[in-house]
Image: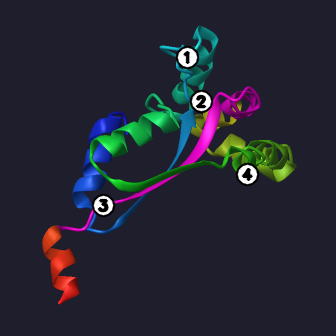
Amino acid sequence: MPDKTKFVNELARVAAPGGTIIIVTWCHRDLSPSEDSLRPEEEVLLKKICDAFYLPAWCSTADYVKLLKSLSLEDIKAEDWSEYVAPFWPAVIKSALSWKGFTSLLTSGWKTIKGAFAMPLMIEGYKKGLIKFAIITCRKPASIREETSSLS
């Protein structure tokens, strides 16, 4: 999803009237009102992660919420599940340190090996509060015709 605006617009377009939209994604931390962008060292860390996992640039949870509001979507809610997801990365590293994990990694190809080297970067990002795992939900408004027909 390199173009977050296009992505969110498409979600809103294809959702049924009254339907729920759920976005589950990695985000970077929300910026404070006094910040225009992430700090340079944060940008470097995210770029390394994106390069290793072949990902486009990330945005913040607040950026997604702003996009959803701009489309007049309703009941917008966002939750940070980072504390539940962050333990995944050390667990994956631990499993890779077994003989079976190590041999599987070596036979899986360069893309997987490159991703494995980025796992400590994910741990670092979570520890620094830079990386967030967000769950964002909202609802597409029901059309007027459907609202009136359901009353009859």
Which residue lies most toward the bottom here? 152
* Disc nearer the start of the sequence (2/3): 2
Q: What amino acid is at disc 4?
A: Tyr
Distance between the alpha carbons at the discs numbered 4 and 2:
16 Å
* Disc nearer the start of the sequence (3/1): 1
Instruction: In the rendered structure, find residue 101 and report the number of the disc placed on it.
Output: none
* Disc nearer the start of the sequence (4/2): 2
Q: What amino acid is at disc 3?
A: Lys
**Disc 4 packing (10 Å; few <14; some 14–19; many ≥20):** few
Which residue is labeled 4 in the image? Answer: 84
Asked whether the viewer can see residue 141, the reply is: yes
Distance between the alpha carbons at the discs numbered 1 and 4:
24 Å
Residue 116, horizontal then vertical, whole percent:
68, 36
148 in relation to 108, above or below:
below
Q: Secondary structure at mark 3?
A: loop
Q: Are marks 3 and 4 in contact (CB under 8 Å)?
A: no
Q: Are marks 3 and 1 in contact (CB under 8 Å)?
A: no
Distance between the alpha carbons at the discs numbered 3 and 1:
31 Å
Distance between the alpha carbons at the discs numbered 3 and 4:
28 Å
* Magenta region: 118-143
Q: Are marks 1 and 4 in contact (CB under 8 Å)?
A: no
Residue 8, horizontal then vertical, whole percent:
32, 45
Which residue is labeled 1 in the image? Answer: 38
* Disc nearer the start of the sequence (3/4): 4
Asked whether the viewer can see residue 23, the reply is: no
Q: Are marks 1 and 2 in contact (CB under 8 Å)?
A: yes
Q: Nearer the viewer, mark 3 or mark 4?
A: 3
**Disc 3 packing (10 Å; few <14; some 14–19; many ≥20):** many
Which residue lies most toward the top here? 40
Residue 45, horizontal then vertical, whole percent:
62, 20
Q: Secondary structure at mark 1?
A: loop
Which residue is labeled 2 in the image? Answer: 29
